[in-house]
Image (tube, rainbow, N blue to C red):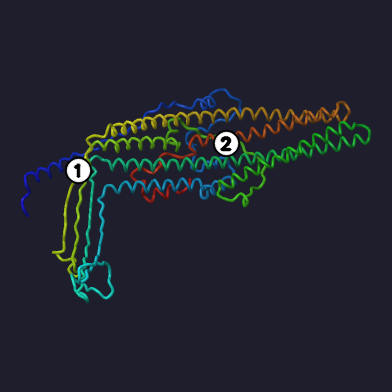
Amino acid sequence: MAPMSPMGRLGVSAFGFVVLNACNVGPGYVKPVVDVPPGFKEASRTAYATVPPDTWQPAQPEDAALKGRWWEIFGEPELDRLEAQLNINNQNIAQFFQNFMAARAQVDEARAGYFPTVSVNPAYTRSGQGASGGSTFGGAAAGVGTAGGAVTAGGGSTMTQYFSLPVQASWAPDLWDRVRNTVREYRYAAQVSAADLENERLTEQAALAQYYFELRGQDALQDLYNRTTVAERQSLDLTRAQAITGIGADLAVAQAEVTLANTEATGIGIATNRALYEHAIATLVGKPASEFSMPVKSTIVTAPPIPVGIPSKLLQRRPDIAAAERTMAQANALIGVEKAAYYPSINLTASGGFASSSLGNLFSLPALFWSLGASAAETIFDGGLRGATVDQYTALYKANVAAYRQVVLTAFQQVEDGIATLRILSQQIARQEMAVKSAQRYVDIALAQYQTGVSPYLNVVTAETTLLSDQQTLVTLRVSEMTAAVQLVQALGGGWDATRLPAASEITSRRSADRMSKGP
């Protein structure tokens, strides 16, 4: 081999210097700092202020933290079974999981940029020419040709054949971490998708729990109206009997008939809402509404104490906060991708293979051919395109920072809202229970006075209407308390923790896919 010229050695040295000194041109990522209060205001007010004994209070101490199967704190076995079905069959969760799998695949697509591209293009041609030299044909002519070079066929025509097995390779070294930042971008995007999956899972779980308690509230209302209808039918029988004996009047009978009819009509309408909630639950658990039904259960449980912890831990418990933070990291990596456009790109190419007119000599040394090459490209003028692009993605990163801080603020607000709502609802329920007892006493007195002829039946109607209204309000408040408890659990992240988010380095591993496919 001839010695390399001084210019050649200089070029190789320059290329080696560039490769060795290539660096990441993108900005380093640092998670933005957010202001975190030392404690939840509403939780402190509930725990340490003087409050009525029936007021709801969050669980203490911290060791009662929410777990993955957070719905079990409500002590409803039927809800537990429904949540288990939801985690397997809910189609929205399945959709978000496949989005995560697609995001994982994009990471592997980006990683392909680290490696050279190699292609092979084997070819075989055969051509012939007539004796007169005026016609040429290609392909496999019937009855013509042998495995060799040029041959002569009948009539003086000639045929040639050619075998080739070329291999080409090209590689663009990642001098300015364009590929590396692209891989980081897609890894962070996959983590965003994983956090979105967990957030969707929590959303669907919370929706199921809320629909469940709303349905049970409809069952309680139906039971209330059924019992009220029985009582009012008895009152109607009483007024009719008194009217027949002359003690009562037809006016009292008419009033009792109107009251009973109104109660029956309202009670019938309750079935509509129950059916809608039942259909919604069927969809959540992945079953056709036509094939799903839930037994009637008129009791409503009381909201349990819920551990709220401290605000600093909320940042690690909310999947939407994790998604917003990973979105910032993704935007930061994208800035590095765009800054790499300022630097030259180098492409190395190599080709080689075998070519021969004889298949038997195709892999012989004389049939070998090869070539090596390198090229470099640098944009010297683009009218400010690269600078504008970097400015665009820098602004988008700052927008993501603002979005992240807004998500954190919203999370604190939702927790404070949930704690305050539960505390106030528990006070309302305690007072409403007293109102129901008083209304029942009002009915008993009015009915007794009517039976003795002291007061008209209108007083009984008024008392019964008041009692029904107070009882209905109590049922509504209890349902609101249960749905508020579910919303507070959702605001706290449902027992999720950021440690369950796949690390960027393992995002494409089978273990991460298996873990994300399973519910809590």
Q: Amino acid at mark 1?
A: Ala
Residue annotated with mark 1 = 376
Seen from the viewer's position, the closer of residues 449 and 378 is: 378
Per the model, the C-alpha gap separating discs 2 and 1 is 68 Å
The residue at the point 46 percent across, 42 percent down is 198
State which quarter of the image contains the N terminus.
bottom left
Residue annotated with mark 2 = 304
- For the residue carrying disc 1, how many other residues have a C-alpha within 10 Å: few (<14), some (14-19), or many (20+)? few
Q: Secondary structure at mark 1?
A: strand
Left or right for 449, reference 350: right
* Residue 152 in picture, x, y percent from top left: 19, 74
The residue at the point 20 percent across, 48 percent down is 348
The residue at the point 17 percent across, 50 percent down is 373
Which numbered disc covers residue 39? none
Q: Amino acid at mark 2?
A: Pro
Q: Residue furthest right?
A: 246
- Label 2 or label 1, whichever comes before in sequence order: 2
Seen from the viewer's position, the closer of residues 148 and 469 is: 148
Q: Residue furthest top?
A: 50
